Amino acid sequence: MTANEGTPAAQNLISAFERLTAEFTAEIGSLSTEQDMRAVQARYLGKKGKATELMKALGRLPPADRPAVGESANRARAAIEEALQARLLALAGADLATDLERTLDVTLPGRGRRAGSLHPLTRVRLEIEQIFHGMGFEVRTGPWIETEWNNFDALNTPPDHPARDMQDTFFVEGGFILRSHTSPVQIRTMLAGPPPVKIIAPGNVFRRDDDATHTPMFPQCEGLHVDRKVSFEDLKATLIVFVQRFFGPDTQIRLRPSFFPFTEPSAEVDASCFLCEGKQPARSACRLCKGTGWLEIGGSGMVHPNVLQAVGYDKYDVTGFAFGMGLSRMAMLKYGVQDLRLFYENDLRFLCQFPTS
Amino acid sequence: MKISLNWLRELVELPAGTDLEAVAQALTEQGLEVEGSLAKGRELAGVLVAEVLDIKPHPNANKLRIVRVRAGLRQESVVCGAPNVPPPGNRVCWAPPGARLPGGHTLDAREVRGVLSPGMICSEIEMGLAEQAEGILILPATAEHGIELAQYLGVVDEVLEVNVTPNRPDALSHLGIARELAAHFGTRLRPADLGTVSEQSSGITMDVRIDDPNACPRYTASFVSGLTVAPSPIAMRLRLQYCGIRAICNLVDVTNYVLLETGHPLHAFDFAKLSGPIVVRRARPGETMTTLDGLGRALLAEDIVITDGTGPVALAGVMGGNTSEISGATRNVLLEAAIFEPRSIRRTSRRLGLISEASYRFERGVDANSIPFAARRAAALLAKLGGGSVVAGMVDRYPRPSLPSKVKLRTAHLQRVTGVDYPATFARDQLVRLGITCEMVADGLVATVPTFRPDLRIEEDLIEEILRMGEYGKPAHKERIRSNATSQVNPEAPADRARALLASAGLHEIVSWAFVPRSALAAASGDGAQKELADGIALQNPISADYEVMRTTLLPGLADAFARNLARGVSDAWLFEVGRVVRRPAQPGQAPVERAHAAGLITGPRAEWLKPGEPVDFYDLKRIVEDLLRGFGLQDAQYRAPAGVSFLHPGVSALVTTGTGAELGCLGELHPAIARRLGIEPRVFYFELAIAPLAAATASLRAEAPPRFPAVARDVSFWSEVSLSADAQRAGFLSADEPLLRELAVLEDFRDPKYVPAGKKGMLWTMVYRALDRTLTDAEADAAHGRVVKALAKLHPIEIR
Ligand SMILES: [Zn+2]
């Protein structure tokens, strides 16, 4: 049965329902919020709404017409809801589109306080510790205020030894001194336990010197490896691995005979200049290595038997090597810093160039 | 030490083409580091040795003369104003047109009072060879005319700066360095030839006695008579000057020259001023003498003196006395060549502040067995330059002969220490190059070490010698690196953790001196109110008052760094330092106590965005400290006021402890009066914490899964007494022991007097309630919240708003 087959009254009612949908769609077309649209919807479909009014006429129709009209009422309800949903969807799309039109000035700075910095001497120490840690060296520390025995005598440097001239020592009350190198840490470590010992000892040391190239306090890092069958070749290998990790894989080392009371044989350690790579013509003009192609990085050698003896090790059973370097020098080389004093001026404009990692 | 390359070339054969760089490299590789070199005499070029042919007066000037000179095939007439033009047949220095003199001056032919003069005849001053001179330089008649003066005198030279380590006294001379080069290049050494010295069979002499053979193991006295004091020849003066020694007169210069050549200190006494005999002994208590510099010296029993019949005439090895000094009238000389005990020389020279070329060598050790050579060399030179003669018969007292030592080297030990399987024959060949004789034995060799190498005493010393020539430079074998498991933690790790935490909180790390001025500790300690801060461990020999006392707190360093940045226009410096402070030990005589501290200082505006921020305050500082403690896993730190710390504002500061009461440190506003004394005007906030208790309080980290049921939040707002702290309120709430309460936090502390009753503050807290096993109902949450609020109200008078 179709609407056309019904009475005129029924057909009027059916078209009224159809008009209702069109009217609703038109009315919500100007609205922009769901709330407003629901209010309008209530006027159509609510208890006192237009659809309800129309339905009141349903009862006056012949029973045969009622199903068709009822069905058109349901269609109108569904269509109204559908129109509302369609409109809502359109609106959401428009909102999203508008939202996506937002822009800002990405070149303005980020919000909040910037991270601080680690001192370059800290950074360089951490890097060096990490390299030696990878080779199995443990970090050891010791006091600044030391006995002369730990600082000199145990290190084969008796009183009146000319080598005590090489370091001008600070004396503190109570018969102590400020350590002039971190070697007392080696002594303390060996006194504390039997070999093997494989340590590095970073820390501040003190010498009575204060000029453009010396500071009365400066950080050092020494290393010590004592065990059976530790040889000069092991020292060389350790040093080449270190310089290649620190300065770059093409770095070479040069050992030069030297003298330290606590090692024999002794060697100065040079690393090839990473800036000019020792190659002419760059080398002649190189400010870093001053044209030599080599950078002095520290001293080294085989632990003197008298040192092993002083700590009660069997000098016929074990051998060892030791090395040491100044961290200020390493930081200057690593970061291209020309002036040593910059490390101790604590000028933020300098310090803030060293991020935390 | 300054070494002349020309001089070296005289003393050792070098392979053809061995230049400065090759010499420097050879020495450096062998452990005698060449730290630099200076090119000498390069400004003088084209000046010729010329023979004077005849001398005529100048037609237009009384004081000028026209000197005809010959240089090789060239002959010219040169105008000369000097009064000392020598008679024909002598040699002078002629700078012809085109020659160059120091200062960049190039000569040309120039008219002098109407006579054309091709160049000039030069004085030492004009040639840059001396600072003063009288007239032109006259050369010996034996000089070949026509050759370049610079070549003739050795003006063109390279002076090497060689760093000789204290163990190598043998290398403190040109001969010693030459010996190293001979070993390196495998060439011959050619020390000065003594063969032609003619001796006078009799003449002056004086007996010598050594009273203390330990103080003086060997003493020789040579005698040279009939001398005339005069300036030394220019070539010798030049060499001395190049090596950093001032020329004085021939008799003194010879001792210095031989010192530089052989490394043996020598002393020339005016024989006429000695009464004799010479006695070498320790000084007597109360004895005094006047040294060459004119100063009276009080002597101690550790000093060694040379005496004649009247008393000390020299402080042995350190400085001569003024009574026996060489003067213009000296005719006869006693030349001393001796060795003295190094330790005494060192003590005496240090005590008197007299460190000389001689004392420097004596305290490192001079070879007793090469004394005769040095003495003969010097005596011969004295006789030659002073026109005198050497008296035959050197007096030689040698009560403690030094003998070559024998050192055994085991091949197995050589291989163990070096890590290379060197054969014993290789070891022998290397040592022989250095003048060490070796006897092969079953398990190695026995080396006989010459007495000029006192540093070679043990096996390891020989090993260095074996490696020293070429082996140091052999490539390394990286595969030897063996890693071992590390069992102990890095003791510096807690300090490094603090560094990382503070840097990421926006602070910048500084490093300051461990020693500070006493005044800074006085300020920080409130003039001693806090004794442990005031009473720092003092340095006994500080460089200056700025480095007097070991720091007891990190405050002075940070304050100084801050003030410095402020002065440079960096006003919001947030700084920190992690380092040690040193405190007096509990018991006298114990080692001082060293503790690592972390301290920081903040100031300036808070980080606002695109507009100026409000100034930072206590709570900005507290957030930094809280995050630092949290970084160490410390959740239950307590903050207590008043801090009672001398350098903090009494009302705006707190002590920090762990939950169990272990003291960690303090934080607060820097005391305004103390800040001013430390050079700081703006309001700054400061904390200082000890690292060790922080590290000790670090618990191992335990984590929980996130809760499965939702939480319910409830707020409470009330008036309380101003004096009731947030911590006390929190404790009050927690006294309810409410199992559902999970979190509580202050949202507001409201004190505006317009709205708040006098003596009160408005508080707003928020609490979070949650059950572990179910979703809480509103009613359950309300009931729990009621219990919590009631618990506080029961303890303190509060008025719910
Ligand atoms: Zn370079």
Image: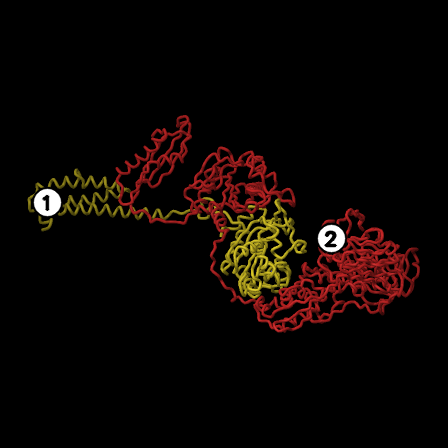
Chain colours: A yellow, B red
Q: Label 1, label 2: how many angstroms apart (C-alpha)?
A: 133 Å
Marks 1, 2 in one chain:
no
Query: Image quarter for residue B221?
Result: bottom right
Residue A48 vs A333, above or below: the answer is above
Q: Secondary structure at mark 1?
A: helix
Residue A163 is left or right of residue B615, and the answer is: right
Q: Position of residue B505 (x, y in %)?
A: 47, 45
Residue B705 vs A310, above or below: the answer is above
Residue at 56% in and 39% down? B533
Residue B55 vs B423, above or below: the answer is above
Q: Chain of mark 2?
A: B
From the image, tell me which residue sits under label 1: A10
Residue B284 is left or right of residue A324, and the answer is: right
Q: Which mark is on residue B355?
A: 2
Callout 1: 10 Å neighbours few (<14), some, many (20+)? many
Residue closer to the observer: A138 or B591 = B591
Query: Image quarter for residue A310?
Result: bottom right
Residue at 43% in and 39% down? B638
Q: Are marks 1 and 2 in contact (CB under 8 Å)?
A: no
Q: Secondary structure at mark 2?
A: loop
User: Which kind of residue does numbered mark 2 sit on?
Assistant: Ile
Residue B275 is left or right of residue B772, and the answer is: right
User: Which kind of residue does numbered mark 1 sit on?
Assistant: Ala
Q: Chain of mark 1?
A: A
Query: In this rendering, does residue B316 appear at all?
Result: yes
